[in-house]
Structures are given as C-alpha cells and as structure tokens.
C-alpha cells in the first residue's frame, strides 16, 4: 500500500536490488568456435558464494587467453539471481598483456561489469554466451 501511495505521489521506494563484488578467472581458446570455462566468487553481504563459469562463442575466434576479471554484479535479488546465461554484444580482442573489459546481462536482469588483464593472444569477433552456476 505504501509503495502504491508513494508511486502515485511521485516518490520512489527503495530498490531491493543489491550490488555484489565478483572475481572470475576464465580461460578461452579455439579456432572458429571458442570454448571456455572457469571459476569465480560472488561476495554479497559479507558472504562468499563460489560459482562455475562455462561459455561458448560461435564466429571468428582464433587463439587462447586467460583472464582474471574483477568487478561488480548489479541488480542482484539474492545470490541465486547471479545464475543463468549471460549475453554480450559487439566484438572484442585480447592481446598479450592487454586490458579487457566486458558487460554482460542475464535473464534475471543481473548485470556483470567486469574488467581485467588478459594473458595470451586471442582475437574474437563473435557473439556468445556465458553460463554461471552456483557451486
């Protein structure tokens, strides 16, 4: 009732969405079809939630890279909402000792904003998905 009244008057109610910290180590390699996987941890409300990451991209992919991404998980509605398949848009490239960044979103509305240095050499112009599952 309070939310309805606040909305009718033009006030906003506090969002229940939370922001957590994320660390992911992801290794990817391939030629034409890129396949990768890794592990990560979500830190939310002082608790650690380990997860696995798997992914595949189809398109132009050559080489291999390992990246330790660090960043934020936005719009969380509890730790389980980080699970799901994430998509990204555009073309990306990793060159030895270069820096990379990515923004991904899943069907739950969770947005991962990640960045980190890449080790190895990879050139990619593919649209792919990454799936996260809590351990």
Image (spheres, rainbow, N blue to C red):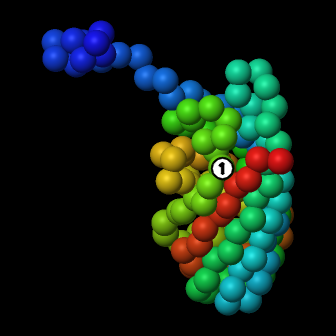
Q: Is residue 87 left or right of residue 62?
A: left
Q: Image quarter for residue 30?
A: bottom right
Whether residue 25 is visible here, answered yes or no, is no
Nearer to the camera, 13 or 123: 13
Work out whether 17 lies above or below 7.
below
How far from the left and from the top, in percent, is residue 33? Answer: 69, 86
* Residue at x 60%, y 60% (from the top left corner): 85
Answer with left or right where residue 67 lies relative to residue 10: right
Q: Is residue 64 visible?
A: yes
Q: Is residue 62 left or right of residue 84?
A: right
Along the viewing direction, whichever of 102 and 22 lies nearer the viewer: 22
For disc 1, the marked residue is 83
For the N terminus, give its image quadrant.
top left
Dot 1, how many residues are within 10 Å of its Cα: few (below 14), some (14-19), or many (20+)?
Answer: some
Residue 12 x %, y %? 30, 17
The percent position of residue 123, horizontal first and vertical second, equals 67, 78
Task: Classify mark 1: helix, strand or loop.
Answer: loop
Residue at 58% from the left image edge and 59% from the top image edge: 86
Specify whether 122 is left or right of 103: right
User: Which quadrant would residue 13 be assigned to in this image?
Assistant: top left
């Amino acid at each position: 009732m309070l939310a309805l009244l606040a909305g009718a008057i033009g006030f906003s109610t506090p969002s229940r969405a939370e922001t957590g910290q994320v660390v992911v180590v992801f290794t990817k390699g391939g030629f034409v079809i890129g396949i990768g996987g890794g592990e990560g941890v979500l830190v939310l409300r002082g608790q650690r939630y380990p997860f696995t990451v798997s992914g595949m991209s189809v398109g132009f992919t050559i080489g291999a890279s390992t990246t330790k991404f660090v960043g934020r998980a936005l719009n969380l509605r509890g730790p389980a909402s980080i699970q799901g398949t994430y998509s990204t848009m555009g073309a990306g490239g990793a060159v030895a000792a270069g820096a990379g960044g990515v923004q991904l979103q899943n069907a739950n509305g969770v947005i991962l904003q990640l960045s980190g240095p890449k080790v190895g050499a990879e050139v990619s112009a593919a649209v792919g998905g990454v799936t996260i599952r809590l351990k």
